Amino acid sequence: MTLLLLEALGAGLIFVAIIWWTMFSGRQGGELPGTHPEEKSTDASPQDKAQ
């Protein structure tokens, strides 16, 4: 029973380590500005253009 608990704990720690590594291994300053398509929109929304 103890061996099963140790294996479950080890698997949980590996899982958390993988999640932690993927979350915080990106660029030091975050994403570059203007890399997302929604940031490149024009001043008027499509609803404003229809009116």
Image (spheres, helix red, strand yellow):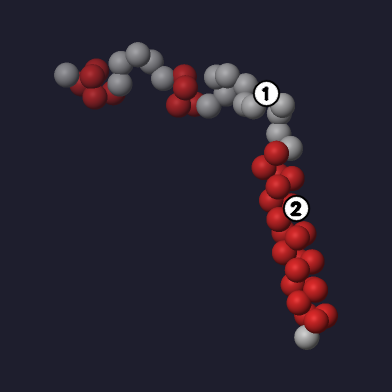
Query: In the drawing, does residue 46 fall left or right of residue 38?
Result: left
Q: Residue pushed farthest right?
A: 3
Circle 1 SS class: loop
Q: Quadrant of residue 46?
A: top left
Between 18 and 51, the one nearer to me in the picture: 18
Q: Residue 18: x percent and y percent?
A: 74, 52
Q: How many marks?
A: 2
Which residue position holds label 2? 17
Q: Residue 32: x percent and y percent?
A: 62, 21
Between 43 and 49, the one nearer to me in the picture: 43
Q: Residue pushed farthest left?
A: 51
Question: Which label sits on residue 29?
Answer: 1
Q: Residue 47: x percent and y percent?
A: 24, 24
- Above or below residue 2? Residue 32 is above
Quadrant assignment for the N terminus: bottom right
- Above or below residue 44? Residue 23 is below
Between 4 and 18, the one nearer to me in the picture: 4
Q: Residue pushed farthest bottom?
A: 1
- The amino acid type of the residue labelled 1 equals Gly
The first of marks 1 and 2 along the sequence is 2
Label 1 to label 2: alpha-carbon separation: 22 Å
